[in-house]
Image (cartoon, helix red, strand yellow):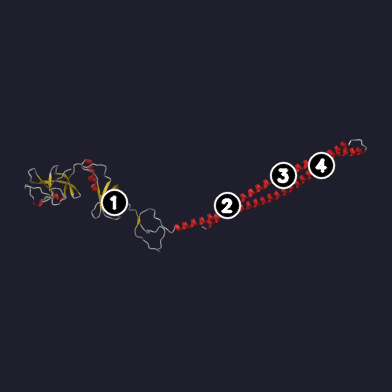
Amino acid sequence: AVAKAQHATALAAESRAKAGLANAEAVVQVAAAGRDTALAVLEAAKTALKAAKETLVSAEANAEPLRLRAARFKELIESRAVSQQAFDDADAGRRQAEAAIRRASAAVDGAAAEQVRAESGVKVTDAELERAQAGLLASKAEVEGAAAGVQSALAAVKSAEAVLDNAQINLGYTKVTAPISGRIGRSNVTVGALVTAHQPLPLATVQQIDKVYVDVPQASADLLRLQRRLVDGRLSHNGTQNVVKLNLEDGKPYSIEGTLQFRDITVDPSTGSFILRMEFPNPQRILLPGMFVRAKVEEGVKEDAMLVPQQAVARDTKGNPTVMLIDAAGKAEVRNVRLDRAIGNQWLVLEGLKPGDRVIFEGMQRLRPGVPVTETAPVNPGAKSAASNKQS
């Protein structure tokens, strides 16, 4: 700051010096113009003096014959050789010639005095011009000195900036900046602890949680079954296989859908599973690292799939799954079914049911095959009727 203030002061001094130089140059120009005028006046005075002297010489030359004629007529008038009128005319011519001489002499004196004044004026303008030129030289020297001061101040500013840059670099070494943005948890070291470069223990861990990865293990046997179903046509792709949904630890669904990023190509031999990685936006920071969630990945679509509530499925003595239906006569009927997998609170039925079958899923403990069945409203007001028609 001090160096910049000195630089600003030097710049102001340079500006003043340049203004003084411009003023001195203007004064020199005025003085030079005055000297030129004085020289012109002197030259005119010399010309006028020369002309006056020539006029005086001419007047004296013209007066001499007139003097001689007047003197001769004066002698002749005494002897009455000429008339009085002739003498008077000759004497008048003499007097006029002498008057012309006096006028010419006075003009010479005036022209000489004017020349003296012009010479004095030239000397005065010469002195003024010399003073102006001396002032101009002084102003130029002041400008050069001010410019040198500006350069010196500028060098001081650059030196101070270099010192400041070095200090800022050293100050930057006192801060550890994370290479990524995110949130930081607890610090692994306390204030005042000794740390070194490349130490194995990080100072802290920065985690980006605006988007989170969810890793879900999937059994390799499930993948093989999925591939077989896709090959034999039991399942098909509908273009939404990359969309993933989550259920949180409390069982509630996560409101934002994610995307399947990739399936790992290596199976863990100890577990017989591989990893599915999904990415979920996390603007409200609900998902946290280490949290357990349940992912719902749509692997394929079965267009004619049938689902029945899990509570409608029972097991016979051999462990085979069965369901109870209402036959055409309105009586209970037991039918064996082949199940695939559980989807939520329902079973996916592969065989044993057809569209239009009425499945019983409440009150089955009191039923026996062949017993008439009366349909009633379900106990749960939000559920469908006891003999719901499960078809798709």
Q: Are marks 1 and 2 in contact (CB under 8 Å)?
A: no
Classed neighbour count for the residue bearing mark 3: other residues with Cα under 10 Å, few (<14), some (14–19), many (≥20): some
Q: Position of residue 281 (x, y in %)?
A: 31, 50
- In terms of secondary structure, where does tag 3 sit? helix
User: Which of pointers 1 and 2 lies earlier in the amino acid sequence?
Assistant: 2
User: Distance between the Cα atoms at labels 4 and 3?
Assistant: 29 Å
Query: Which numbered mark, 1 or 4, is in the foreground of this view?
Result: 4
The CA distance from mark 1 to mark 4 is: 137 Å
User: In screen coordinates, is 195 left or right of 310?
Assistant: right
Marked residue nearer the N-terminal end (1 or 4): 4
Q: Which image quarter is the C terminus in? A: top left
Identify the residue shown where x is 69% and y is 45%. 37
The residue pinned by badge 4 equals 99
- Per the image, the residue denoted by label 1 is 215
User: Is 308 displayed left or right of 54 in the figure?
Assistant: left
> Any mark on residue 15, and which?
2
